[in-house]
Image: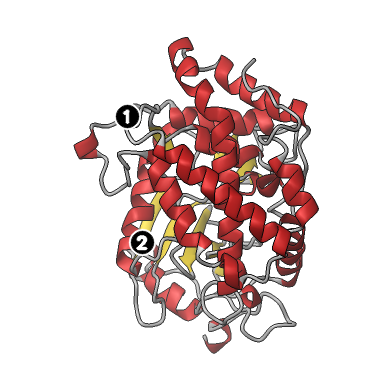
Amino acid sequence: MAQLKTMAIAEDNPISMLPNLVACLEALRALPDFAALDANALEPAGFTGMAHDHIRIKGQGLILRVPRVSQWGLAAVVNLAYQSACFRRAYASGHTPALHSVLPPSTDLPMGALLVEEIEGRKPRLPGDLAAIGAAIGAMHGLTLPRIEDRRPLLSPINSLAATLKTITLQAAFLESAGLNVDTLRALRDELDWARKFVDRYAQPTEPTSLILTDSHPGNFVIHLSGKAFFVDLEKALYGLPAIDLAHATLYTSTRFDPDIDAVLTEGETASFYRDYLAKVEARRAAQLRPWLAPLRRLVWLRTMTWCAKWTVESRGSGGWSRQRLDARTRSHMEACLKDFFDPATVARQRSEWSGGRAVEFGA
């Protein structure tokens, strides 16, 4: 079985490897349902994640989701338990894959893995699939909210705004070493100042809370053969402010992120997405959400930009975040996106949405 040990994703890169496939096979064979799994049953799933590798079990309708790194810096066992809870809680929405099994960490599979249902379909095409994505997000937000004491292990911050600002602040520590243009750096510092002042105004939170996806950019959705959207990257779900998901699904930095999507929405398309979402929400709930829609776009944009700075710095090495572990196409697209996102003209254009330039009406 030595030929299974590693499999190159990109021939131009010696460290661009899938996980130890022998370790994956042995871990799967430890499960009763896969004790007789054929040695040649594993193959690359054909898509690349920033923090996970994906391996298909041929003919089983299952994907092995293998973390390279925890985006929240969790220990391997804790990361698996958190992701497992995300899959189980979100499954009731009807828009996420089922969780089949959990493979514990081992010497050769240090982060363990999750075995999940494979959703047959394609990446979203924007703007055409926005309605399907909105329906999936709405179904998630519409799940019954558990009592606070029943929400663990998923995070349920007392104040979603303060929790988001904390994430931004931690990521912003990388701004100085990300090699940014002076004007871009100044603009992001100004946004940080705004974010701190904005969050300070809401020390006593009044925002509505739902189970949210958090990382709801379109690249994390698959459009099923039926046309239904499924969210497949359940790593960061938590109980928080629904407007976070709506923003991250439609911001420029989100719709360009995946090389198979790489779209730019018009203001009208973005506004239509919000209107469609709000039209399907109970009137009182929609009224509660409206004041948060615009400011949360600004906050989530800053969260994304500071994440990009963090990734720029941390991906220079050879660890789990390494850009050299991405296939050549994804790596090239990511580098082009970062150049664009951090360009002063792009930053100015994005900021004009909320800084006195053009106005986008949400739910009007």
Name the residue nearer the viewer: 233 or 354.
354
Residue tagged by mark 1?
Answer: 145
Mark 2 or mark 1: which comes first in sequence?
2
Q: Residue at x 40, y 71 (%)?
A: 111
Colouring mode (rainbow / by chain / secondary structure / one colour): secondary structure
Q: Identify the element where label 1 is drawn.
A: loop
Where is residue 329 drawn, in percent x and y? 76, 67
Left or right? Give the position of 304 relative to 34: right
Q: Dot 2, crowdedness within 10 Å: few (<14), some or many (≥20)?
A: many
- Tell me the amino acid under the disc marked 1: Leu
Using the image, tell me which numbered label, if any, was put on residue 190.
Answer: none
- Tell me the amino acid under the disc marked 2: Asn
Left or right? Give the position of 148 relative to 95: left
Q: Residue at x 63, y 19 (%)?
A: 275
Quarter holding the C terminus is top right
Q: Identify the element where label 2 is drawn.
A: helix
Above or below residue 40? Residue 215 is: above
Where is residue 299 drawn, in percent x and y? 54, 42
Residue 31, by quadrant, is: bottom left
Name the residue nearer the viewer: 9 or 247.
247
Above or below residue 246? Residue 261 is: below
Residue that sits furthest to the left in the current view: 149
Name the residue nearer the viewer: 80 or 290.
290
- Residue 353: tell me if it is visible: yes
Q: CA distance from mark 2 to mark 1?
A: 23 Å
Above or below residue 68? Residue 318 is: below
Using the image, tell me which numbered label, if any, was put on residue 79.
Answer: 2
Q: Residue at x 46, y 13 (%)?
A: 282
